[in-house]
Image: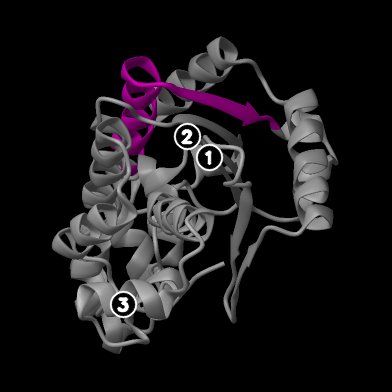
């Protein structure tokens, strides 16, 4: 899924459209590069996503392609948004791989199946810091603050004018686990309620009484996008590796797991009631 630049979905969409315009005009990359005075391989690298397309170069390409004014403006706006510096690039010291964050940034719908950890979009800074320290050997605790800060930057996604729709299936055990202690745990539960009430987020708790269900096969995140050419992807992070897949069989399996979790999960209102009850008990 990723490229050397870990392009956003908007970036990949722009490159597809530019290549389609070039091919419709019957021009080769070498011919276009020659007209612009570029190195003959430059457009190849741009279209493959190996070189960044700056706005000036995009404007030159659109002039060569002689697109109509409306198309020019649309593609220019897409290019301006597609190649903005993502927040995640400032955290490459702690997140060397950024393909997930680039995809999450452009998703129109995000679905979590969470069994062991709360999704980062919902974590408080103290929760994130405690979770990071628990997951790392002591000599690496110095990065806990950086990781917590990254989680908070990530949450700006929910504050956008066009936030994604978010659905999270949360195992009930997540509500009872006192990550960081009772005070931090109670504050985290209040954060969950605030997120669900103020933003397009649906929280669905899978209660202990549900017994065995398809979601117990493992946690994952399903990212879906607007646009017929931008298919869904599923992401799963583990101790030794991460999986980022758009294979039909993997997507079908994840959708089945989500459907079965949905079958046994509490509805949003009952989930909120349970979260409030657990928070009061702390």
The residue under label 2 is 108
**Image coordinates for residue 108, horizontal then vertical, percent:** 47, 34
For the record, the magenta segment spans 184-207
Q: Looking at this view, is 34 or 129 the one in front? A: 34
Q: Can residue 219 be seen by looking at this rendering?
A: yes
Which of the marked residues, 3 or 1, is nearer the chain's N terminus? 3
Applied colour scheme: one colour
Q: Answer yes or no: do the residues labelled 2 and 1 have beta carbons within 8 Å?
A: yes
Residue at numbered disc 3: 33
Q: Earlier in the sequence, mark 3 or mark 2?
A: 3
Report if residue 187 lies within the magenta region.
yes
Residue found at x 84% / y 55%? 249
Cα–Cα span, label 3 and label 1: 32 Å
Whether residue 125 is visible here, answered yes or no, is: no
The residue mark sitting in front, 3 or 1, is: 3
Looking at this rendering, what residue extends furthest in the left direction? 56
Name the residue located 56 percent from the left edge and 20 percent from the top edge. 271
User: Horizontal placement of 185 versus 112: left or right?
Assistant: left
Specify the quadrant of the image occupied by residue 141: bottom left
User: In terms of depth relative to the viewer, which is nearer, 89 or 270?
Assistant: 89
Q: Residue 142's quadrant in the figure? A: bottom left
- Between tags 3 and 2, which lies in front? 3
Q: Secondary structure under badge 1?
A: loop
Q: Residue 151 appears at what percent x and percent y?
A: 29, 54
Q: Is residue 270 above or below residue 17?
A: above
Q: Quadrant of the N terminus?
A: bottom right
Report the residue at 39% width, 49% height from top: 10
List the residue tagged with mark 1.
Answer: 225
Inter-mark Cα distance, 2 to 1: 5 Å
Q: Are marks 3 and 2 in contact (CB under 8 Å)?
A: no
Q: Where is the C terminus found, in terms of image quarters?
A: top left
> Which quarter of the figure has residue 196?
top left
């Amino acid at each position: 899924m990723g490229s050397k630049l870990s392009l956003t979905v908007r970036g990949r969409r722009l490159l597809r459209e530019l290549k389609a315009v070039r091919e419709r005009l019957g021009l080769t990359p070498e011919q276009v590069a020659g007209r612009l005075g570029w190195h003959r391989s430059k457009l190849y690298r741009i279209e493959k996503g190996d070189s960044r397309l700056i706005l000036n170069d995009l404007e030159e390409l659109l002039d060569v392609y002689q697109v109509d004014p409306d198309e020019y403006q649309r593609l220019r706006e897409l290019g301006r948004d597609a190649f903005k510096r993502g927040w995640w690039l400032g955290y490459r010291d702690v997140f060397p791989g950024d393909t997930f964050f680039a995809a999450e940034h452009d998703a129109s719908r995000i679905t979590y199946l969470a069994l062991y950890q709360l999704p980062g979009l919902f974590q408080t800074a103290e929760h994130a810091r405690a979770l990071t320290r628990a997951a790392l050997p002591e000599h690496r605790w110095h990065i806990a603050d950086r990781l917590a800060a990254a989680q908070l930057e990530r949450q700006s996604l929910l504050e956008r004018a066009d936030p994604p729709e978010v659905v999270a299936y949360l195992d009930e055990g997540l509500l009872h686990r006192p990550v960081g202690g009772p005070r931090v745990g109670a504050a985290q539960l209040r954060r969950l309620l605030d997120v669900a009430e103020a933003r397009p987020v649906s929280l669905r708790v899978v209660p202990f009484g549900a017994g065995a269900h398809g979601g117990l096969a493992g946690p994952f995140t399903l990212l879906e996008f607007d646009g017929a050419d931008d298919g869904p992807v599923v992401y799963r992070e583990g101790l030794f590796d991460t999986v980022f897949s758009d294979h039909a069989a993997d997507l079908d399996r994840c959708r089945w797991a989500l459907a079965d979790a949905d079958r046994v999960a509490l509805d949003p209102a009952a989930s909120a009631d349970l979260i409030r009850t657990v928070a009061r008990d702390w």
